[in-house]
Image (tube, rainbow, N blue to C red):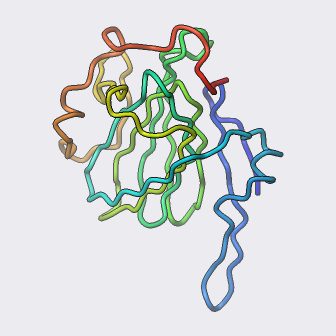
Amino acid sequence: MRVHAGDLHGLVIVEPDVFRDDRGSFQVTYERRQYLEAGIGLDFVQDNFSRSARGTLRGLHYQIEHPQGKLVQVVQGEVYDVVVDLRRHSHTFGRWSGIVLSEENRRQLYVPPGFAHGFLVTSEWADFLYKCTDFYSPEHERTLRWDDPQLAIDWPLDGGPLLSNKDRQGKTLAECETFEHGTEHGT
């Protein structure tokens, strides 16, 4: 397993070892000892899975209380994964980062608590799997606008995205609630 620091404070890109032969492939998607050695020492309490069609944009989501760290990966297809640092104490506050996650590159991204997270499906379908460090808390969930002009996220769009009503009603960075101090489990 290879681990690289992302371009925002606290992001970690993980490239698991993939073993291939004539039968197919095998990889360990999570092994606590390896992730502890890589500096990802939080306990994961919930796994989520979504399947989405091309052009679906989910996000940018976060929880203002019970913030979630997420270990995200694509099992099938490809997405453009985006995070925005909402931790006011961070030197990368208000900046975004994007990375392609796919079944081909097998990358994982660790997103610390205090970030908004979302993705755009760039393949016909994408199966997206992620582990969370805290439970889903709908009353604390917030949505940052995917098209906030202040952020100017360079989504690889081919036409307008498919959005949920919740995602259409997101707030801009200037309007949204942010993390004033450290997060419960954040860096």
Figure quadrant of residue 20: bottom right
The quadrant the N terminus occupies is: bottom right
Q: Nearer the viewer, residue 55 or 63?
A: 63
Using the image, determine if residue 38 lies above or below residue 33.
Answer: above
Residue at point 75% right, 49% down? 35
Horizontal side, residue 114 vs residue 26: left or right: left
Using the image, determine if residue 176 lies above or below residue 170.
Answer: above
Horizontal side, residue 107 vs residue 77: left or right: right
Q: Nearer the viewer, residue 108 or 104?
A: 108
Using the image, determine if residue 87 lies above or below residue 60.
Answer: above
User: What number of labels is visible?
Assistant: 0
Q: Position of residue 184 (x, y in %)?
A: 60, 22
Q: Position of residue 71 (x, y in %)?
A: 57, 46
Residue at point 79% right, 53% down? 34
Q: Residue furthest bottom?
A: 22
The quadrant the C terminus occupies is: top right
Q: Position of residue 82 (x, y in %)?
A: 45, 37
Q: Position of residue 84 (x, y in %)?
A: 47, 26
Q: Nearer the viewer, residue 155 or 41?
A: 41
Horizontal side, residue 28 vs residue 143: left or right: right
Figure quadrant of residue 148: top left
Residue at point 52% right, 34% down? 68
